[in-house]
């Protein structure tokens, strides 16, 4: 929350509003204090003039007329009268009249006292601070208006963030177009244009791949039908298995395409290691071979994964492990939460991460064929399921370890038994 731009702008607005209000308050207060001092000085001048009139034998009527001409009038406020009664009597001056400036309750008066009575006069002219209050109020309204304007301009960021989140999850049917003309509006519109271009490219790529797979399935289907007409049962079975294998490869390519475009939905479930290996044997046509090259040490352990994606990964690993082993055999075991695939053979010549690159070709392998997508497919299918693959080499044995896939393990067999 503290890193949110909305939080920062709100904090800045509150600080600006408080600062403006404090400045206005102290400014108006200083103006009022200055006006009081100015009035006090003016009253003293009036009092000095009245005392001069008294000195030159002026009577009370002359003084009252003088005060009236200046705009003074007798105050009639009850609290002021009470203060006057409590005011300490002072000696009467010349001609029985005395004038003095006094300050009561932050207000300034002229006290005119005779033998019979004492009267307080107050200037009827009052300084108005209404303009200051109006300016302060207008400034506060302006700050609130600017704050609302900035927040309104930033609100599309929340919608844009949500749309980007949907886009990252593979949803391409989203729109960020806006009529806003500022930088945020330009950003949203540019992102909307990018989404449309990506969606168009993805659609054309999908159409292209589907067209290719459709064209490939047609001859495979025809070949499958033709294989049924072969009289030799052994050749017939082999042809049918080959065409089924090709059809399965097409389906795997479709899953890889969905995985790369982030449109594949994982369907994790629990299954036995033995179930997985039997399925892979059919994919590799091992069930048709005379000798089983797979040694399974923990068939009853449970794995939780997307069955078809995981089988695709393990199938590629087993295919390579058998192909590059000394004895054309591979051992499968479990260790805690990991599935281990091991074979006796030469160690990898390059760093293990190098093999994850697409179209990787190991020039050190004599007679190596293919497009170099095996390990790339393995890495991506495992990453999509949240699993990790590592490599170790010990005592002339290669270990490929898929971590995090085994959920139950009842019969853990140490690694060293793989060498037996």
Image (cartoon, helix red, strand yellow):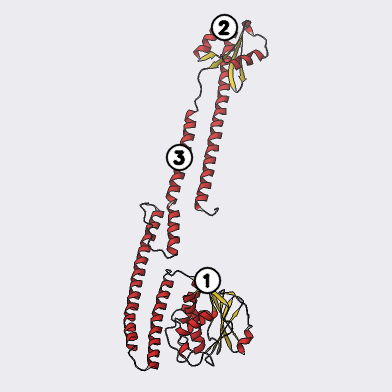
Disc 3 target residue? 142
| Secondary structure beneath label 2 | helix
x, y percent for residue 397:
58, 87
13 or 366: which is nearer to us?
Answer: 366
Reply above or below: 269 against 81.
below
User: Total of numbered circles in the picture?
Assistant: 3
Q: Is residue 253 left or right of residue 311?
A: left
Q: Does residue 44 appear in this view?
A: no
Q: Residues within 10 Å of mark 2 (few under 14, many from 20)?
A: some
x, y percent for residue 308:
46, 76
Q: Is residue 415 left or right of residue 262?
A: right
Instruction: Kindly report which numbered mark, 2 or 3, lies closer to the viewer in this rendering.
Output: 3
418 or 17: which is nearer to us?
Answer: 418
Quarter occupied by residue 412: bottom right
Disc 1 target residue? 386
Q: Distance between the residues labelled 3 and 1?
A: 53 Å
Residue at coordinates 54% horizontally, 9% vertically from top-left? 64
């Amino acid at each position: 929350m503290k890193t949110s731009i909305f939080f920062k702008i709100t904090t800045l607005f509150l600080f600006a509003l408080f600062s403006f209000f404090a400045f206005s308050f102290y400014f108006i207060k200083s103006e009022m204090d200055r006006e009081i001092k100015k009035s006090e000085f003016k009253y003293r001048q009036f009092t000095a003039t009245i005392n001069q009139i008294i000195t030159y034998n002026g009577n009370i009527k002359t003084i009252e007329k003088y005060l009236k001409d200046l705009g003074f009038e007798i105050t009639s406020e009850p609290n002021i009268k009470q203060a006057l009664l409590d005011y300490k009597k002072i000696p009467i001056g010349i001609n029985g009249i005395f004038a003095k400036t006094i300050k009561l309750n932050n207000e300034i008066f002229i006290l005119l006292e005779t033998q019979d009575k004492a009267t307080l006069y107050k200037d009827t002219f009052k300084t108005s601070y209404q303009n200051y209050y109006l300016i302060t109020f207008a400034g506060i309204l302006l700050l609130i208006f600017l704050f609302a304007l900035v927040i309104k301009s930033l609100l599309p960021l929340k919608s844009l963030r949500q749309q980007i989140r949907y886009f990252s999850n593979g949803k391409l049917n989203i729109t960020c177009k806006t009529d806003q003309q500022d930088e945020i509006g330009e950003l949203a519109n540019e992102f909307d244009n990018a989404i449309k271009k990506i969606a168009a490219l993805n659609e054309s790529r999908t159409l292209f791949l589907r067209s290719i797979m459709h064209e490939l399935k047609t001859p495979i289907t025809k070949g499958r039908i033709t294989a049924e007409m072969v009289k030799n049962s052994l050749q017939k079975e082999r042809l049918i298995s080959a065409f089924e294998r090709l059809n399965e490869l097409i389906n795997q390519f479709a899953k890889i395409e969905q995985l790369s475009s982030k449109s594949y939905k994982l369907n994790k479930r629990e299954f036995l290691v033995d179930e997985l290996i039997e399925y892979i044997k059919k994919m590799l046509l091992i069930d048709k071979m005379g000798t089983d090259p797979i040694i399974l040490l923990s068939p009853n352990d449970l794995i939780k994964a997307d069955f078809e994606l995981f089988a695709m990964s393990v199938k590629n690993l087993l295919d390579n492990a058998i192909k590059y082993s000394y004895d054309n055999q591979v051992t499968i075991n479990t260790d805690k939460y990991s599935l281990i695939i091991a074979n006796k053979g030469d160690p990898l010549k390059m760093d293990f991460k190098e093999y994850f690159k697409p179209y990787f070709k190991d020039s050190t392998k004599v007679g190596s064929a293919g497009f170099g997508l095996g390990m790339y497919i393995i890495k991506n299918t495992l990453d999509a399921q949240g699993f990790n693959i590592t490599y170790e080499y010990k005592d002339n044995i290669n270990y490929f370890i898929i971590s995090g896939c085994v959920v139950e393990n009842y019969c853990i067999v140490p690694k060293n038994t793989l060498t037996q």
